[in-house]
Amino acid sequence: MLRSIILILLLLFSPTLWAQPSLIIAASSTKLLPSVVKIKVQRSDYIAEDNELIQNDSGGSGFIFDNKHHILTNTHVIKDAKKIVVVDINNTEHPAILIAKDEKADIAILEVPTFNAPLIPIADSTQLALGDNIFAIGSPYSLGLGVTVGVVSALERYLPNYPYQYFIQTDTAINPGNSGGPVFNQNGELIGVATMTFSKAGSYTNIGFAIPINEAIRIGTLLIAQKKVERGYLGATLLISDKVSRKLGHQFSVLITHIDAKSPAQQAGLIAGDIVTKLNDEKFFDNGALHRYLAHSKPNDTLTLSYIRDKKVMKSVVKLGATPVNILSTNNIGTADQAEKLGLILENGSADESVQVVLSYGPAKTSGFTTGDKIVQINTIGIKTLKELNTQLSKLKETEIAMITLYRNGELVTLPLASKTALQGYTTSN
């Protein structure tokens, strides 16, 4: 009898219990909406009409960061922008100035002198737990501000293409346009910055990712104070690949594919081909461990790298330097560009106006491409940079084969490059 009464009471009151978080979120989101903005970005040379500040080529979201008119958003939201405007809850447009941005952390700071809004309460993102109720505010597809609700699905999620930090995973809908917007706990406290969603063509996956607010605040504060994030410089190109790690016989590792001249890595004795397996005598928990360490490092920091060279275990102590001003990203690792889709990991040559093969796999490896090849032509068209090569590759149809001319050990070699489908039945004479 008592058991029946308890069951009846649970059925009667459970809707009320479940409704409480929704009521709290509804009340919180209403208060927070004025502190969130839609961001309009103009990347073209379009001339706006009289009644608008800019034509919206693309956009995202952002939120008030401090009481000095600063807005925080994602770097990819404002990338290559010629003009930036923020739109408040009242649909008023405010011109914005880019103060600074950090590509690795994907955080940017804007200054909007005409925008004022209440500051947002902030939580400690390290205190999040699986299953916590959360909600996001943003401008999906530039439609205007809206609220989506979900839970924390995973913490400290590692993403291979974004190895410099961990992410909060959520089933809260994060659509294009939500990027840069705030994510809150059910009490309306800021816990993250909506950054990306995972999806496959033709399906809705309900998997979104947010930068933990502790990290976003750290980066944002540095950008305002220093206009940049100064990190320790190793001077090595690092290849992250689960497949490569397994092929090399390690669960987690990082392959060094290039060493900058006169860099800390070179001075410590590291060379291309070294397989790094430990950082400060600790095994990697995933392939992003070294990148995350470097993302939080400073010049003159010292680290110990354990690595394998010619099947021998070796160790080097590296004192990090300051990043040279001329160091730019010159490889296509993790970009899913045309070359990578066909099985080529490449980097721009240092001074010889060529594109160098770092690693080949799939169709490219089948065709005979190998590490060290220097590509100089595609279908008799000279190429000097990765961008030029990908421009030509993007013109190929699925069934077309490109003939690539390259230097190997001082000799000219010509190899076919195409999709696996196009290469079926293709033979070379010997």
Image (spheres, rainbow, N blue to C red):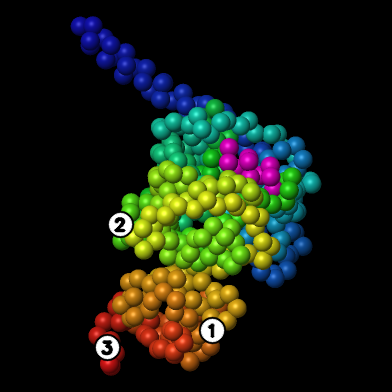
Mark number displayed over residue 383 = 1
Q: Which of 407 and 197 is in front in this view?
A: 407
Q: Name the residue under label 2.
A: 249
- Which region shows up in magenta? 214-223
Q: Do the residues labelled 1 and 2 touch (CB within 8 Å)?
A: no
Q: Is mark 1 on a helix, strand or loop?
A: loop
Question: Principal SS element in the magenta part?
Answer: helix
Write down the quadrant of residue 428 in the picture. bottom left
Q: Which residue is drawn at 64% across and 50% down?
A: 299
Q: Which residue is drawn at 41% across and 21% down?
A: 17
Q: Position of residue 263 (x, y in %)?
A: 60, 62
Q: In this view, does 236 lie above or below 20?
A: below
Q: Residue at x 57, y 66 (%)?
A: 260
Q: Looking at this rendering, what residue extends furthest in the top direction?
A: 2
Q: Quadrant of the C terminus?
A: bottom left
Residue type highlighted by circle 1: Ile
- CA separation in Å, label 2 and label 3: 32 Å
Q: Looking at this rendering, what residue extends furthest in the right direction?
A: 113
Magenta-drawn stretch contains 352: no
Q: Residue at x 36, y 58 (%)?
A: 312
Classify mark 1: residues with Cα within 10 Å, few (<14), some (14-19) or many (20+).
Answer: many
Q: Where is residue 232 in the image (x, y as percent from the top left)?
A: 61, 51
Mark earlier in primary sequence (1, 2): 2
Mark earlier in primary sequence (2, 3): 2
1 or 2: mark nearer the eye:
2
Mark number displayed over residue 427 = 3
